[in-house]
Structures are given as C-alpha cells and as structure tokens.
Image: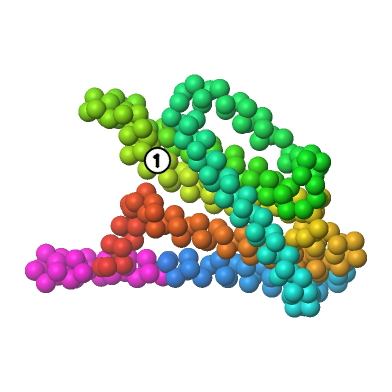
Amino acid sequence: MATKQAVGDGSMSPEALRRLEALAAAARRRRRLQAWLPWLVIIGMFVIWEVAVKAFQVQQFVLPAPTDIAASMIKWWKPLLDNSWQTLMTTLIGFGLAIVFGLLLGIAIGSSTLLYHGLYPLLIGFNSVPKVAVVPILVIWFGIGTVPAVITAFLISFFPIVVNVATGIATVEPELRDVLRALGAKPTDIIRKVGLPRAMPYFFASLKIAITVAFVGSIIAETVAANKGIGHLMILASSRFDVPLVFAGLMVTAVMGVAMYVAAVAIENRTTGWAMRGQTDQQQALAGV
C-alpha cells in the first residue's frame, strides 16, 4: 500500500517497485512454506519409516510400520481414548499447579537477591534428582493411582517455569529500577508494571518446555504406579508383546503434546506479540507492498 502511494506521487521508480514486489512475493512464499513445512516433514518421516520397514523386512515386534500402528489405533481406539483422557487430565492438573507455584516462586526469587542466592542451589539440587526415583516414594505416601502421576507432572515441569520467570524479573536494568524509585514507585509497582511484562516472554518460553516434559512425568508415573493412563496401557501392551499398541500410545502422547504446545504458542502470540514486533512489522511491511 505504501509502495502504491509512492508510485502514485512519482517517488519510486518502476525498477524499485519490481524489487519490492519480488520481496513481497518471496515473503508470502516463505510464510506458505512455513505453514506447510511441519506437515511435509511429518509425512516424509512416516513414508521413509514405512519404506524402510518393508524394504529391510523388519519384524513387527521389533519396529512396526506406521500402517500397523494405525491399524492398532483403529482396533484399540476405545482403550486409547479412555487412557489418553486420564493422562491428559493428570498432566493438565500437574501442569496447572506448576504454573501457579512456579510463577509465584519465580516472582519471589527474581525480586529478592537473598532468595535468589538462597534458594537457587536447593532448586538445582532438587531438579537434578531423577523423577523416576521419586515415584516409588510417592506410591508409599499416596498409593497407586492418579496422585503420583499428578505430582510427578508437577515436579518435572515446575523447575523451568521458576527459572525463566525469576530470570525475566531479575534482569530488569538497575538504572530503570533507580529511575522508578526516584519517581516514587514502590517495589511491588516495579514488579507489577515492569518486572512481570519483562518476564512474560521468558514465562511463555518455559511453558512450551514444561508442557511437553509434564507428559513425560505423567507417563513415567503411570508406567510405575497407576491402574489407568497411556503409560499403564503401554506396559500392558509390552507385556503381551503388542508392539504396535505400544507405539500407538507413543503417537497419542505425541499428538497431545503437540496440541498443548500449539495452544501455548497461540496464547503467547496474543499476549506477548509485542516482544516479536520487529519481525512481525517487517513481515507485514513486506506483505503489504
């Protein structure tokens, strides 16, 4: 649009217009490629997988072909749906608790130097403990069922949220803090109006990591101490050497993880789009040529 106005008043030559139109067309092609590229990669991976299994005559109990996995998903769709709902529920509960407590603790650590230096070694040491080793303790405390899966999902997704939120708040420039204090701002005002907006890109980056590892926590707990869920279903399938059903459980978990990741990205784009405004403005400018 700006280019058309420039051409209309004679401020841009036809050659420059052609170059800008070529850039705009390239930008549009790039956006279309970005939209289709994940699907093309996934389809290509499954095609290569199918061809390799058939070409090398890999036995089904070693590595099933995608068509065998799809057939298993159709055959066992009801148990898969029932158990995937259980896994999704436990993961979302644990992930929600991780968001609440991780955000609160991250704000506290990021806004206090004493808490930052005092609690960080404890958090790092706690995060270094393998969560699969914690599950038997949770079983002793809470028994077999949903609670250990929820707590494991919480524990494994809690640390990334705390670290990223604390980093976002702690990296507010000291000069900016001094100016705001000189203008009469209270520490809570600095955190609320500067620290939290600064931490939001870090926060959503941690969410995209935490939601995927939360599924890992739920599956780990379900394979050890649960009577329902995708992890429990996979253990039962492996005990019967039903490898296609095991891979079907993996596929369902991957789909749920990708769906939650996409939801987190959509919320991020609507709430913190200002953090990417430089790239967005450039793409919009090229598209509007």
Residue 50 visible in the snapshot:
no
Residue carrying label 1: 196
Question: Label 1's element?
Answer: helix
Expressed as whole percent of the image width and height from the top left, the position of residue 19 reads 27, 66
Q: Which residues are magenta?
A: 1-29
User: Is 192 or 212 nearer to us in this picture?
Assistant: 192
Expressed as whole percent of the image width and height from the top left, the position of residue 279 reads 36, 54
Applied colour scheme: rainbow
Task: Answer left or right for 241 relative to 263.
Answer: right
Residue 91 visible in the snapshot:
yes
The answer to if 21 sits in the magenta stretch is: yes
Number of residue marks: 1
Q: Would you place residue 272 above or below residue 163 in this image?
A: below
Q: Count neighbours of disc 1 (C-alpha within 10 A) and say few if under 14, some if 14 to 19, many if 20 or more.
A: many
At x 57%, y 59%, the residue is 260
Expressed as whole percent of the image width and height from the top left, the position of residue 258 reads 59, 61
User: Is 222 or 40 nearer to us in this picture?
Assistant: 222
Q: Quadrant of residue 101?
A: top right
Q: Would you place residue 118 above or below residue 247 in this image?
A: above
User: Is 210 or 114 nearer to us in this picture?
Assistant: 114
At x 48%, y 45%, the residue is 203
Q: Quadrant of residue 250?
A: bottom right
Task: Answer left or right for 59 relative to 274.
Answer: right
Q: Amino acid at mark 1?
A: Leu
Q: Would you place residue 72 above or below residue 159 in this image?
A: below
Residue found farthest to the right = 240
Q: Quadrant of residue 82?
A: bottom right
